[in-house]
Image (spheres, rainbow, N blue to C red):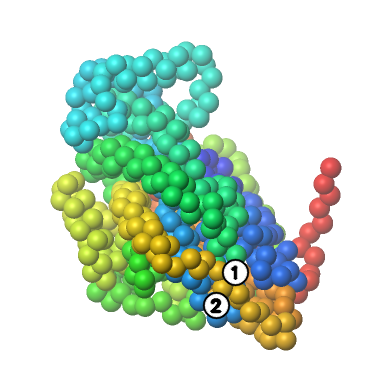
Amino acid sequence: MSKRVVVDPITRIEGHLRVEVEVDENNVITDAWSSSTLWRGIETIMKGRSPMDAGLLVQRICGVCTFSHYRAGIEAVENALDVKIPYNAELLRSLMQSSLYMHDHVVHFYHLHALDWVDVVSALSADPAAAAQEAMRWTDKPIAAGEGDLRAVQERVAKLVASGKLGPFANAYWGNGTYKLTPEQNLIAVSHYLKALEVQRVAAEMLAIFGGKQPHPQSLVVGGVTCVRDALSPARLQEWKQKHGEVADFINRAYLPDVLMAAAQFKTEGSVLKGVGVNSFLACQDFAIGRGQYLFEGGVIMKGDLAGVSEIDHTLIKEDVTHAWYKDGDAKHPYDGVTEPNYTGFTKRDTVYGELPTVDGDGKYTWVKSPRYDGEPVEVGPLACLLVNYAKGNSRVVQAVDGLLAATGLPIEALFTTLGRTAARLLQTTLVTEAALETFDALVDNILVDEETYVDPGMKDSEEYVGHSMVEAPRGMLSHWVRIKGGKVENYQAVVPTTWNSGPMDANGKKGPYELSLIGMKLEDPAKPLEIIRVIHSFDPCMACAVHVMDYKGTDLGQFQVG
Ligand code: NFE
């Protein structure tokens, strides 16, 4: 007899996500539905606005990857107007992006994902002296250095548990059999979790040096950047470099060894070795490190065919709404997207926990659309970026991936798993962290001889323009699409990483990456579905980004009263 398990909400993400699965009598997942229950409307307010304001407005799509939407909005307009920005501006944007990654990926691994791998309660029974020895197994210079520090962390956590106010550690599935770290390893990871709270502040400051503030930086404009005199003073540049060193130190001495430790302990755990699902991947070129040079190349891998990696053809991107809460229509290219809401809700059914609202398999079940590339669902994100670059023979990526496989003893197939997705995010972080120094040096060299940071975009109200941008946001490839007429935005659309990954089934019955990554996985205890959360968190969901409602025909999407 099959039963439904509903996880609603999935916490430790941005926004509202609900995941429902069907399990058979052996607790193996036979079907899955990913639903966003959040609805937003940022693109609607773009209509009729000045394209010069697009970046500032669309960065409000999200509170996390604000810089990514900001930049994508600015660069879509620059593409439409055929503006080539100065080299300094390109390098500064790249440095801001690297800073964002160093912040976002550290926060994701420790504060949003680690507790899927780390049993905090188990850390209470660790021997701090043995834990100090254990930390030395994974790096020569552990951040969690010394018995005294680790004992202090243990006492801090014990006090928290004794107080009964568990805060971020409440309502978890502690003791679940799929936690694989030893008590000592759990203690090391908990100490890094706490340290990461401080480090992420430093990383946020890095972006603020060039962006004015973080989140929602202010220093990009169509045509270049405005962070010039103050931000480019030797003292500010030095400040960025010093903070970079501090965060890089944590990445190399905590994040990297923690992933190696997790890989070693979890490498026989079936749920993290379950295949990724769609096996098709999409990533774009990004991270300027010099003139015409980029850290990552772009491309598409379809159905696991690494040898057949190809260039992106944007005309093959379409969005389907068959199972999303919008009025039906053919899948549309983003320049021509239509979004008319049609909320149908859920039906009730017997579940593992009693009767609950559940998905009707043939119906609509989310506010997220289904983006497709050449008719296929594809995964975007750090794993996609690394696989595309590995397939293309990008030497830095090949070296990093081969190095990780050698260090962990894992076969290449392990990349195509939840563990691989989490390890890919680490490798992307280390590659970006290292390359940011090249970008920094290129900037320092260039500003000695070239002070240009802005060009007049030269928009004419009498002309019509169409353009798009593609950037790698921390959660994957992000594209913005704009039509400009009479000096105003006529139509605006964002196709967002979490939309690619969390989208529902399409008209052809093809499920999205979240859904396929769950089907076939066995749960230890359906009433404590830790494995579902671990897999979904490995994508780093952001539903605020994923759901964006646009209606350029002027239809009322709803009426709201505030206050
Ligand atoms: Ni709201 Fe985002 C990123 C974008 S999301 S965090 O990274 O674009 O999918």
Q: Is residue 148 visible?
A: yes
The image quadrant of residue 259 is top left
Q: Is residue 213 above or below residue 307?
A: above
Judging from the image, what secondary structure is the residue with disc 2 in? Answer: loop
Viewer-side residue, 348 vs 286: 286
Q: Which is more N-terminal, label 1 or label 2?
A: 2
Residue shown at the point (21%, 50%) measured from the top left: 404
Q: Is residue 370 above or below residue 533?
A: below
* Dot 2 amino acid type: Val
**Label 2 to label 1, Cα distance in Å?**
8 Å
* Dot 1 amino acid type: Val
Q: Is residue 260 above or below residue 398?
A: above
- Answer yes or no: do the residues labelled 2 and 1 have beta carbons within 8 Å? yes
Viewer-side residue, 9 vs 424: 424
**Crowding near pointer 1: few (<14 within 10 Å), some, many (20+)?**
many
Residue shown at the point (67%, 71%) measured from the top left: 51
Residue shown at the point (41%, 67%) measured from the top left: 449
Residue shown at the point (58%, 52%) measured from the top left: 217
Viewer-side residue, 225 vs 188: 225
Q: Label 2: which residue? A: 83
Residue 15 x, y percent position in the rendering: 59, 47
Q: Label 1: which residue? A: 222
Residue 447 x, y percent position in the rendering: 43, 62
Judging from the image, what secondary structure is the residue with disc 1 in? Answer: loop
Q: Is residue 6 visible?
A: no
Q: Can you tell which mark lies on residue 232?
A: none
State how many labels appear. Answer: 2
Residue 163 x, y percent position in the rendering: 51, 14
Residue 125 x, y percent position in the rendering: 31, 17
